[in-house]
Amino acid sequence: MTDLSIAIPDSFVIDSQSLLDKSMKISQLARACSIFRVRNIFIYNDRSTRCEPEDRKIIKTILEYLDAPPYTRRQLFPQLWMLKYAGMLPPIKSPHHKPKISLQDIEKGDVRVGVILKKDGVWFVDVGMDEPIRYSGTISNNKIVTVKLISKYPYLTAAEINKDSLAGYWGYTVKFSSTLKGLLDSRKSNYILLTSVEGRYLTDKFCTSFFTDQIKSIKDLLIVFGSPKNGLKKILAAEKVEISDFPFVINMFPDQGTQTVRVEEAILGTLAIINQYTIR
Amino acid sequence: MTDLSIAIPDSFVIDSQSLLDKSMKISQLARACSIFRVRNIFIYNDRSTRCEPEDRKIIKTILEYLDAPPYTRRQLFPQLWMLKYAGMLPPIKSPHHKPKISLQDIEKGDVRVGVILKKDGVWFVDVGMDEPIRYSGTISNNKIVTVKLISKYPYLTAAEINKDSLAGYWGYTVKFSSTLKGLLDSRKSNYILLTSVEGRYLTDKFCTSFFTDQIKSIKDLLIVFGSPKNGLKKILAAEKVEISDFPFVINMFPDQGTQTVRVEEAILGTLAIINQYTIR
């Protein structure tokens, strides 16, 4: 299975007038990434335009809120003004959003997301049960971790595990990166797909062989999106980078019937198409 | 070019709590259909569930409002409570949403959408210019029509034409149909694709040959979607029809990372994928 990452500009919500509008746009992004099992969302600094400096923080916070299992949210996200509308957004229901079950029903080996907390000098993890469970792993108060439950009730202990070692999808991670150039340079060894209305069609011969033959064996694919204001050509030009230096610049929506495709629409549509090629 | 139609249930907005929620969901549908040049949107009666009887009217009215060029709206859509939030929805900007230009700049042969109106006993059509233009065609007050402009200013006349005769995309038409069975029966001679989480993958051999070879030569393709509550299997079962009677029952989102894919997401994603196969 190919690990998917996407990159979006910090100007992603620049066309949204209110916090409610921004929240809904971010919610569509969170759902698209979850449906198609995106592992990393990079937020890069769009040098081609000036946006509210707090927008990148809003994007990251709402994305992380939506990816966090509901039972972890009260502890992880204190009453923040930027989460005012987050509670009414449609839920993601990813595999790591597990329901509350009774402590007795936990099976040895179950994997759950939890929040680390200290009680009477001892470290516990709240995994959404009636009470927190004894924890062993790296320690940091109010940190979100993935744990494996060792032994059964009443001797339950939770040991931290690396979520990347899990076979199935286990949510996404949100990361800030500085410039787009910086991000692309840092991932040179991996495949990068730039989306652009001026790009090649996926049905172009050059692309077809890549997508039908090679893509399945790629470990890591990064798909990059532009902003509501400027496409990637302009965003890269603002960093003195030529988009033509990249082999895979692709127009995913040939013959589009509208003047523009919104970024959140482009992300869902692109991921839906790529998913057809990456499944085995 | 394949003509695309989609069918959605009248329960499409059954999971939306408020008129604002419904409006936004319908807006996403309108944009997805416009991006991928859908010509017909059929709203069928979902017999598997009970929804607000006014919902089908809300869906049709907001869809038609968004497809109508902005300058026609005041006349076509009087102050309706169901359009309360329609003005703040993102615009579609389809090719038939032409900007206002001066009468002098109109070229002979220009095609525009207009609204028929009567002035001093003579029929005119308002095509978004400074003043309405003399009209020849079938007559009906406050009706939306597509016209070709004959001769130049100041002798402008507008003659009705059939929008289906135009080469490019010219918006969608919304139609009520009774039951889903009724709709499917009426289109037996055309290709029908039913979307279902229990369907085959598009990468399945049976589908591949159809999609890579045949689909381009199909004149008319209908893609059918289920509701937020029930999939097509259940909706058809409520009409005593077996979904297995249809050859093309397809799961467009193999390995989905979320418990469910929302109908508006399924529509955008499905159309994005199909578009890759239907472009020439």
Image (cartoon, coloured by chain):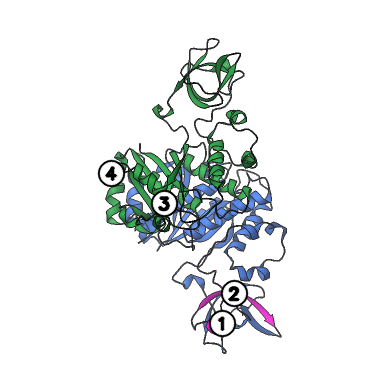
Chain colours: A green, B blue
- Foreground of the two, A210 or A163: A163
| Mark 4 neighbour density, 10 Å: few (under 14) some (14–19) many (20 or more) | few
Q: Secondary structure at mark 2?
A: strand
- Chain at tag 2: B
| Highlighted magenta segment, given as a residue range | B91-119
Q: Residue B225: x, y in percent?
A: 52, 49
Q: Secondary structure at mark 1?
A: strand
Q: Residue furthest toward the top?
A: A155
Which amino acid lies under the numbered mark 1 shown in the image of this protein? Ala
N-term-proximal mark, 1 vs 2: 2
- Which residue was labeled with disc 4? A214
Alpha carbon distance from label 3 to label 4: 19 Å
Alpha carbon distance from label 1 to label 3: 39 Å
- Which residue was labeled with disc 1? B158
- Which residue was labeled with disc 3? B273
Which amino acid lies under the numbered mark 3 shown in the image of this protein? Ile
Residue drawn at (47%, 73%) of the image: B165
> Is residue A116 shown left or right of residue A242?
right
Alpha carbon distance from label 4 to label 1: 55 Å
- Which residue was labeled with disc 2? B114
